[in-house]
């Protein structure tokens, strides 16, 4: 889709969420979380770096957190654009949206689920991303820092990269929403505007958004990593005699933006892996305790 068009759709999704009557505590706290993110992007980040000229890139791996951030980032991009044409006698539709594609980086160093790869590619079209995928070399494993160094050597205009990390992620506790990279990393600024979001906030907004979601979340995965170190979350295992309780997000699921059907596609290549599990699992959004979010991740050997 054209970037301007999808940015406007994301603006409509975000505005619609912010205008919900707030009939659950989760919705009220998510509305607050969105307002903080919008402030950090529009008033701080976009005041320092232009979002329209390649200063800012987006780090994206198809996971729920960076997808949520992408939706709000695109919404802010549309709002930024509207502000730049304010006062002009023509409306948004008669002005050309000034950015063709959003510079985006996907570091693909591990063996990846085909479902994730296909989702990243599909959503890359949907969200108007200009996707850089790090090349994989199975003999020389590149660290994430090295992969970004390579990206920056190709895109020297990059000054800051947006990251969908949260305070509850490993080593995320003391991060700030704008900060330089640490030593051992190439030098650029990190923009981390969803640090304050909790897992319930993520699911509430994403399930309401009407957007497609990576299919692995539908079959019990709660945190996505490599093919060889990621399993469905054991806390979501269904046993035959458990009565299935409703998730905390029934309202969002029943009131999805523009009544969009929930799409959770699994790539045929991953079916065989899923068939090896003897249990069935509830969808990822049945788990809202951050401490258990990575319980399906195996230690890397
Ligand atoms: P996840 O929820 O998997 O990821 C959090 C976010 O990181 C995602 O939403 C996405 O925006 C990004 N991300 C994760 N995996 C990928 C991927 N494969 N390709 C593209 N984006 C991805 N750590 C430091 O200690 N010091 C640093 O200075 C530092 N700088 C970083 C700069 C960038 C641009 C990025 C993306 C990461 C950086 N990191 C740094 C690592 C970061 O703090 C996380 O550890 C890392 O993103 C992995 O996150 P996670 O798997 O714990 O959580
Ligand atoms: Mg995450
Ligand atoms: Mg990760």
Image: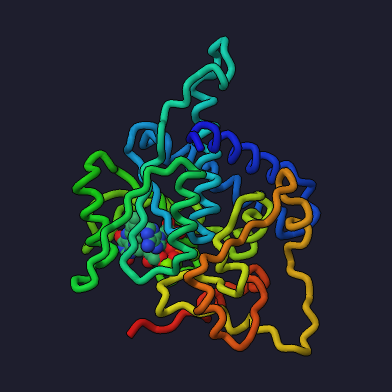
Residue at the far top in the pictured view: 89
Q: 119 or 210, which is in the foreground? A: 119
Question: In the picture provided, is 261 more to the left or to the right than 126?
Answer: right
- Ligand 1 lies in quarter: bottom left
Viewer-nearest residue: 67 or 183: 67
The residue lying at 21 percent from left, 54 percent from top is 150
Pinpoint residue 211: horizontal percent, then vertical percent.
Answer: 61, 50
- Residue 96 horizontal/vertical position (percent): 47, 21
Give me the residue at 72% from left, 50% from top.
256
Q: Position of residue 54 (x, y in %)?
A: 33, 37
Quadrant in which the C terminus is drawn: bottom left
Eyeballing the image, is 118 above or below 233?
above
Q: In the figure, residue 159 lies in which quadrant?
A: top left
Across and down, in percent, residue 299 comes to: 40, 84
In front here: 239 or 115? 115
Q: Quadrant of residue 279?
A: bottom right
């Amino acid at each position: 889709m054209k970037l301007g068009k999808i940015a406007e759709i994301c603006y409509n999704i975000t505005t619609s969420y912010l205008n919900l009557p707030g009939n659950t505590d989760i919705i009220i706290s998510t509305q607050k979380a969105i307002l903080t993110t919008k402030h950090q992007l529009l008033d701080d980040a976009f005041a320092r770096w232009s979002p329209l000229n390649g200063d800012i890139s987006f780090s994206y791996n198809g996971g729920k957190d960076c997808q949520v951030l992408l939706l709000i980032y695109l919404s802010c991009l549309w709002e930024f654009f509207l502000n730049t044409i304010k006062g002009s006698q023509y409306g948004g539709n008669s002005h050309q949206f000034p950015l063709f594609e959003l510079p985006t980086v996907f570091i693909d160093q591990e063996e990846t689920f085909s479902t994730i790869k296909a989702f990243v590619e599909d959503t890359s079209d949907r969200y108007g991303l200009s996707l850089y995928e790090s090349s994989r070399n199975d003999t020389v494993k590149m660290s994430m820092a090295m992969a970004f160094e390579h990206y920056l050597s190709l895109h020297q205009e990059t000054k800051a990269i947006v990251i969908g990390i949260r305070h509850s992620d490993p080593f995320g506790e003391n991060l700030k929403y704008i900060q330089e990279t640490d030593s051992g990393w190439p030098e650029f600024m990190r923009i981390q505007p969803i640090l304050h979001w909790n897992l319930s906030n993520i699911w509430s907004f994403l399930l309401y958004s009407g957007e497609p979601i990576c299919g692995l979340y539908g079959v019990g995965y709660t945190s996505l990593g490599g093919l060889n170190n990621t399993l469905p979350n054991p806390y979501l295992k269904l046993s035959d005699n458990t009565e299935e309780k409703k998730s905390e997000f029934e309202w969002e699921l029943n009131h999805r933006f523009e009544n969009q059907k929930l799409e959770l596609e699994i790539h045929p290549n991953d079916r065989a892996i899923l068939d090896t599990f003897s249990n069935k699992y509830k969808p990822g959004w049945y788990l809202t305790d951050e401490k258990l979010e990575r319980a399906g991740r195996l230690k890397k050997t």
